[in-house]
Every structure is written in C-alpha cells, then in structure tokens.
Image: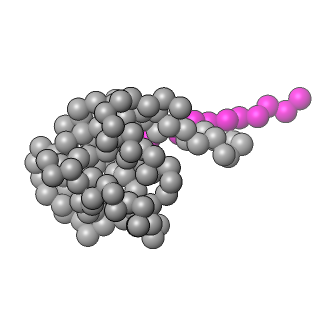
Amino acid sequence: MSLSVRRTVVGAGVVVLDDAGLVLMVRADGGYRLPGKPQPATEALPVAAVRAVEELTGVWVEITGLVGVFNDDSEPWSTELAVCFRGRPVGGRLSSARAAWLEPERLAELAVTEATRLVVEHGLDGEPYFP
C-alpha cells in the first residue's frame, strides 16, 4: 500500500482599501495580485498578513475584518489555502516600484486573474466569503 502525502500551504493576504477607495496591488508574473505570502508556522495569520503587506509594498496596514477563506486544490499533492483579510493603510508609503494603488473597477482591464478579482469584489462588499 502506498501512502499519498498531501500538504497544505497556508497563505495570508489583505485587500487594502484607502480612503479614496483604491486597492493596493503588487505587480507579479506580468500582472497584479493582492499583497500576501505564505504564513510561517511561528506567526499568527493576521500578523503574517500585515508583515507581508509591509514587506511587499512599504504600506503599514491595520486589519479591519475578514474577506474570506479561499482554496486551490488543483495540484494532487498540495492544497493552497489563502486567508484574506480586509485592511486599511495606517502609515508608511509605497516603497516598491512593484506596488500600486489602483481603482477596483480597472482590474478587469489589467492583467489580474479572475480569482484575484473575485477576492477584491468580496473585499469590497464587506461580507465574509466562504466558498
């Protein structure tokens, strides 16, 4: 009998909206994505999410709620689980040419995956989303 090992990678991200309604995005792989990273085992998810936003963009954020829990089980050996928070900027400034404040309605025109657009939409509507 062979044992199949499946691992779960947990990531933490944030839909950051400023007072003007712009969303904070990061350029990656020829397009844009939300700021976030895999969670270290020694760090709580909200802490990991805040740290990832600062590292990737230079913006300091405060978590204001939960957008939802999203998963991608397309790989037979791995499940990617993303916990996405809602947040607002409380300091810092863009420190990377890869980071940008964008109008949410422009995301359809830009190289943004459908999954990312879905997360942003749920981040804007204010209700937690659990698929």
Rendered position, 63 above or below 24: above
Classify 16 as above or below 41.
below
**Residue at image point 35% right, 30% down:** 127
**Residue at (89, 29) in percent of width and height:** 1
Q: Position of residue 58 (x, y in %)?
A: 20, 56
Question: Left or right: where does residue 72 sit relative to residue 5?
Answer: left
Q: Is residue 122 above or below residue 36?
A: above
Q: Nearer the viewer, residue 44 or 27?
A: 27
State left or right for residue 47 relative to residue 37. Answer: left
Q: Is residue 4 magenta?
A: yes
Magenta residues span: 1-11
Above-or-below relation of 59 to 3? below
Observer able to see residue 85: no
Indicate whether residue 129 is drawn in magenta: no
Question: 13 or 20, which is in the foreground?
Answer: 20
Tell me what residue is drawn at x 37 percent, y 34 percent.
Answer: 67
Q: Position of residue 47 (x, y in %)?
A: 28, 35
Residue 104 x, y percent position in the rendering: 31, 55
Q: Residue at x 55, y 38 (%)?
A: 71
Colour mapping? one colour
- Front-most of 32 and 106? 106
In the foreground, 105 or 79? 105
User: Which residue is at the far left?
Assistant: 91
- The location of residue 68, given as percent across then percent down, is 42, 33
The answer to which quarter of the image holds residue 5 is top right
The image shows a total of numbered marks equal to 0
